[in-house]
Image (tube, grey):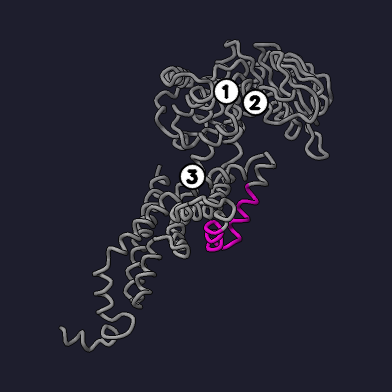
Amino acid sequence: MSELIQNIRFLQEGPFAIPRWEALFSNIDVIWQGLLVTLLVASLGLVLALALGTVIGVMSTSHWRIARAVARVYVEFFQNTPLLIQVFMLYNAIPLMYPGLFIPVVVIGIFGVGMYHGAYIGEVVRAGIQSIGRGQLEAALSQGFSYVGTMRYIIIPQAMRIVLPPLTNQAVNLIKNTSVIAIIAGGDLMYAGDSFAGRYGHYGPTYVVVGLLYFLLCFPLARLTRRLEDQTRAA
Amino acid sequence: MIKLVDVSKHFGLHYALKDINLEVPTGQKLVIIGPSGSGKSTLIRCINMLEKPSSGQVIIDDVDLTAHRAPIAKVRQEVAMVFQQFNLYPHKTVLENVSLAPIVVSGVSKEQATESALKYLERVGLSAKADQYPAQLSGGQQQRVAIARALNMHPKIMLFDEPTSALDPEMIQEVLEVIIGLADSGITMLVVTHEMGFAKEAADRVIFVDEGHIIEDGTPEHFFENPQHDRTKLFLSKILR
């Protein structure tokens, strides 16, 4: 067995050599730390993105022109600039504007991915709202519901079922995009892996493990939503 | 009392309604008849402001709904509408469909709204379906639920916008019977319909709308036996063979 391993070249030398794996697993706590930060940024970022996205989506379908315009500008700005630059600007521009104000990197990460995906989710929610027939809006209004009440009780619950699949897609992208905060030393999974690997060049095993962890975060989410989707279809 | 004063509604260059003047006393059962595209649906939809008139006034019990900052949502709680396509809330059970607005909009307690909802479902013969979803019901049953939903707002006025036009023929009667059953309720009713038998049986008054004008206005007897306008005679000759 050991003879067999000794004959496999890529386990003896190069980026995937066995000593590199050993080094990684004896320092694996670093990776767990990063995973924890990623989980925190992703979950709070998702909450923020969902809240923002719902507001933006409702504003986009409002008959109030100013609300539509604000939503449009927000969406176009965040969709058409790279997240990397947005996070960089948040990190560097806020201390310039408010000297002495200290914002933890994790908070910047939450706002970075939250606002960015809020724009995408806003578009998803808008499409969902627009897919609900006009009759639903009219029925609710005719019963005396306010516009906001109509959205809350009648339109959005129906739209949410429709937007569940694209919403999962956004959640998965959001988790992966938390890795962008590595550029501002965010302490997340990507940053933890990268800085560990960079010290001794253990990139091979580290990226395999880090990539696997991202997969393990995203894959069950995709499966879960798929199941919810089937359930709502059956109902 | 519903009062329309010089109400016009145009979509672009096309006038759906032109200088409509109409008074409907409390408790009256008014049937609105007219060819498709005549403006009769627009007329009824102006009364609860689902269509905003381009000009003129819509006054319900001395409240001018066309005034700036008119309490439209408040008035709508007393002006229920039944739609051609039912428009039940598909994500809610039958019982929730009937009780939701009283709870959320009118602030009635859940127990009370549920109790009265079950009473009205009983009245339209559907209390057994209370826990089902609209998609599980036939068209006729859905429309009866929509009527129960409207009744549970305890409206003073009910607007029916072609309530049987989307139904299979064998389901029309069950819905019409429910509407006729409301006739002695004291609720003011405006019904846009093509059901002439219903108009004869249930109406106090019939108006005929053509090209955005009311061209005939009178009792059902007057309308069916002694119409004044040539357009009305032509319409009736086509519809009553």
Query: Tag 1, which chain?
Result: B
Mark 3 residue crowding within 10 angstroms, few (<14) / some (14–19) / many (20+) = some
Q: Is residue A62 above or below residue A36?
A: above
Q: In the image, which is nearer the foreground, mark 1 or mark 3? A: 3
Q: Residue furthest front?
A: A100
Residue at position x 36%, y 68% in the image: A193
N-terminal of the two: label 1 or label 2? 1
Indicate which disc residue B218 carries: none
Q: Quadrant of the C terminus of chain B?
A: top right
The reply to whether residue B167 is in sight is: no
Residue at position x 59%, y 61% in the image: A81
Instruction: Give how far across and how far down residue A228 sits, in percent.
Output: 39, 48
The front one of A27 and B140 is: A27
The quarter holding residue A182 reads bottom left
Instruction: Give how far across and how far down residue A21 sits, in percent.
Output: 27, 75
Indicate the amino acid at tag 1: Leu
Q: Tell me the element at label 3.
A: helix
The front one of B5 and A177 is: A177
Q: Which residue is mark 3?
A: A160
Question: Does the magenta stretch mainly form a helix, a strand or a loop?
Answer: helix
Q: Is residue B141 left or right of residue B9?
A: left
Q: Are marks 1 and 2 in contact (CB under 8 Å)?
A: yes
Residue at position x 73%, y 19% in the image: B64
Q: Which residue is mark 1?
A: B176
Indicate the amino acid at tag 3: Met
The quarter holding residue B2 reads top right
Indicate the amino acid at tag 2: Glu
**What range is drawn magenta here?**
A71-92
Query: Tag 3, which chain?
Result: A
Indicate which disc residue B195 carries: 2
Query: Tag 2, which chain?
Result: B
Q: Are marks 2 and 3 in contact (CB under 8 Å)?
A: no
